[in-house]
Image: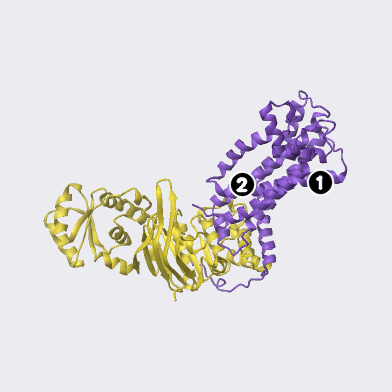
Amino acid sequence: MTAGTTALGRQLPVVVTSPVAVWFEDGWTVTKRNLVKIKRSPDMLVFAVLQPIMFVLLFSQVYGGAIRVRGTDYTQFLMAGIFAQTVVFGATFSGSAMAQDLKEGLIDRFRTLPMSASAVLIGRTNSDLVLNGISMTIMMGTGLVVGWRVESSPLEFLAGVALLLLFSYAFSWVMALLGMSVKTPEVINNASFMILFPLTFISNAFVPSETLPLVLRVFAEWNPVSSLVQAARELFGNVGTAPVPDVWTMQHPVLTVLVGIAVMLAVFVPWAVAKYTRISTK
Amino acid sequence: MAIIEASGLTKTYRAATGPVHALAGLDLSVPQGTVTALLGPNGAGKTTTVKVLTTLITPDSGTATIDGVDVVADPQATRRNIGVSGQYAAVDENLTGFENLEMIGRLYHLGRRAARERARELIDVFDLSEAGDRPVKGFSGGMRRRIDLAGALVTNPRVLFLDEPTTGLDPRSRLALWGIIEGLVADGTTVLLTTQYLEEADRLADDIAVIDDGAVIAEGTADQLKARVGGHRVVVTLADEADGDAVTTVLRRHGVGDVETSGDGRTRSVAVEAGPSALQRVLADLGEAGIDLHDAGMRRPTLDDVFLRLTGHVAAEDAAAADATGTDRAEDAPREQQRETAR
């Protein structure tokens, strides 16, 4: 088959020219590509949807009866912890997806196109934000079914949701950088398991940190995940009369998380983009 | 001035076993509208060369320009002039063929309408309608390569890079892809192609640059390179292996240089100066000695011979494993047969 090529020899004009338009066009094109993937890989969606349902049910129904929390009901206490854990783990998908694209040569393809250097990462973090938003919504629905109630104003509730999603977005950039630095996508999954499980469990997410032995308690009180959990708990009105540890980050959790998000974005966005402009399949 | 110019390119990687000089002062010049093949075994530096020229990696030293644009200093301008298709067929499995091509068009900033129009056009021209509206996931390697190649042609680039375009393809898909590439070349596209298949370089390329250890060790047309190895060879295949020594004696009498023996010992060949008359004399002597032959003939030197002569090892993937020339030669024959079947 000699591809007749009659139609091939034509010059095609570039119509998107201004740098800002290019930036939007590229970011949106890659985001769309990733969203199509979510739509077409049911297994991914099922994982993103079923896992949070499972966590809510397991913790509230299995441990809920055994764990007593001072000043509030365990389900009220638990939900912010599960939200925080889900957004932290949800962000790791950005890492494994970058590693996968790199391995399959798609990053090489993108890097030989005259694209904006940040587009692939922006598209990645955008679509993972959507995925996290979906699982958060489902988790909240499940939470309401098992008795979780938001006891704050609608504005505070929205602020809580925004804070959780913003944190996952910023953390996605950290994981995306890691995803470009590892040899295979599996490494990301294993490594995040090893690091993120202790980080989310040695915190105030599932039990009050005051119940932990001294060393773990200090770790839990200063753990950034604890601040995120505490911030969500406050904004959803789920703290009740439970005592708050006398640590600055726990006393000012919302501010702590906002500063954390700002620092993550300021450091890891430029770092990840710089890394992206140098990587290629081995 | 040539459309692709590279001079003194070097690139060294650190590895656990010490530094690896992927490129060691590589020079290359590709005139507009021609096809140049970079020929060499795995690890010779072919892919590294393509990666430097397609802006994927930065060389440690040396310069490269494409259509007068410095690839290191102005990668974005370079990217507008080139199309790249590689051995990994970098297509998104979850997108359809059409969506893959449309996405690339939009990333070249052609706008939504033109990108879609172009995608439809390429689907027609490359006979991809089957993969047009189904996710690529379920399709064969040959189909993926065609989508990948179509992706490289979205903007009708001035220079097309094909990194081992047919590695791993079945013979039929390989032939189909060669046909497409020949069509593009006829349209005036400049092509830089890497391959470890000598036959591929022989068929597609105007010029061949033989690469080994990160540098070009020989350059020229296929005929020029073959001429460096010498003239014709007389090749005979025995009916009975026991006659081997007698045959070798006869071949040595009429030929120049060493007699080569295939892995199974039945096929023996020698370079000759006189051409057909040498074959006649060999056959007469063998007939007189009462030796039965399975096959006999003349063979022009192949690029395999060229590569073996220039580098001391064969161009196949397993070349690295066969370090001594003796084992190389033994392995040459089965491979030759494989390629025969591939045709």
Find the distance from the CA under tag 1 to the CA under tag 2. Answer: 26 Å
Tell me, what hue is chain A?
Answer: purple
Residue A82 or residue A33, whichever sits in front = A82
- Which chain does the residue under circle 1 lie in? A
Q: Identity of the amino acid at label 1?
A: Ala
Pick the quarter of the image with the C terminus of chain B: bottom left
Q: Position of residue A179 (x, y in %)?
A: 59, 47
Pick the quarter of the image with the N terminus of chain B: bottom left
For residue A223, what is the image quadrant?
top right
* Disc 1 crowd, CA 10 A, few/some/many (<14, 14-19, 20+): some
x 28%, y 63%: residue: B301
Q: Position of residue B297 (x, y in %)?
A: 24, 61
Tell me, what hue is chain B?
Answer: yellow
Residue identified by numbered label 2 = A95
- Secondary structure at badge 1 equals helix
x 71%, y 38%: residue: A225
The tag earlier along the polypeptide, 1 or 2, is 2
For residue B78, what is the image quadrant?
bottom right
Residue identified by numbered label 1 = A159
- Secondary structure at badge 2 equals helix
